[in-house]
Image (cartoon, helix red, strand yellow):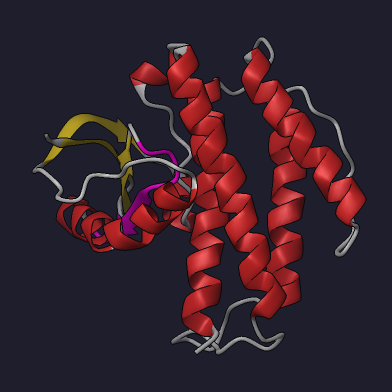
Amino acid sequence: MAVKVYVEAAKKKVFAISLAWPGWARAGKDEEAAIDALVTYAPRYAAIASAAGLKFPARLGPVEVVERVDGDAGTEFGVPGKLASTDADPPTPKELEKLLALVTTAWKVFDEASATAPESLRKGPRGGGRDRDKMVHHVIEAEAAYGRKLGVKHKPPALGDTEAITALRQDLLAALRSGGVEGGWPVRYAARRITWHVLDHLWEMEDRSV
């Protein structure tokens, strides 16, 4: 079965984004490179799907681009921020449970990884990159900001405030389950954006811990 993706393309950066598997999205300098990166990360994403109790394809079919959307400065910065046309469709009950399972599992695996990662992470090829605690706080701050797109209003929890972080995430899940708010992010996109951001930093943390 084909792997259906949509492509978000700006001048210097392109994302290939899975429609069926939220959070499975990778970037490259062009469409071909983005699709190659997506396929390369399939085993890492499969581990997340398995931890969520979901059956990820053991063998990938051909990648089929079903839609192309224009990116913008956010795309160039490294954020897949454009909606697919199908994002407006509410998920079925089965699809919703899949989305929620992947969001929840991404949080769990990220928290586990950050608990064992060294505080000082190896620098990137250009000498940049956040260390562990700053990365964790960045993810939490982003989730508080995402919440406003779903009608959830929380101050960004302090690093290590487990009670506040749990409350924020529970409210995010409740908002996804209830369908969000009028004028906010549709559920499909919100689940994909949250999961992608967590996994993107999870994999960065893993790579920079060695």
In the rendered structure, the answer to whether residue 18 lies left or right of residue 166 reads left
The region drawn magenta spans 21-29
Q: Pick the residue in front: 59 or 176.
A: 59
Residue at the location (48% across, 39% down)? Answer: 81
Q: Is residue 59 above or below residue 69?
A: below
- Return the x and y of residue 137 as percentages of the image width and height: 76, 62
- Return the x and y of residue 112 as percentages of the image width and height: 65, 66
Rendering quarter of residue 149: top right
- Return the x and y of residue 58 as percentages of the image width and height: 20, 50
Residue at the location (87% across, 37% down)? Answer: 154
Q: Pick the residue in front: 48 or 32.
A: 48
Residue 199 in sight? yes
Q: Is residue 27 magenta?
A: yes
Furthest residue in direction left, as rendered? 62
Q: Is residue 204 magenta?
A: no
In the rendered structure, the answer to whether residue 71 lies left or right of residue 30 reads right
**From the image, which quarter does the N terminus lie in?**
top left
Number of marks drawn: 0
Furthest residue in direction front, as rendered? 53
- Return the x and y of residue 19 as percentages of the image width and height: 33, 32
In the rendered structure, the answer to whether residue 169 lies left or right of residue 192 reads right
Q: Is residue 106 above or below residue 184?
A: below
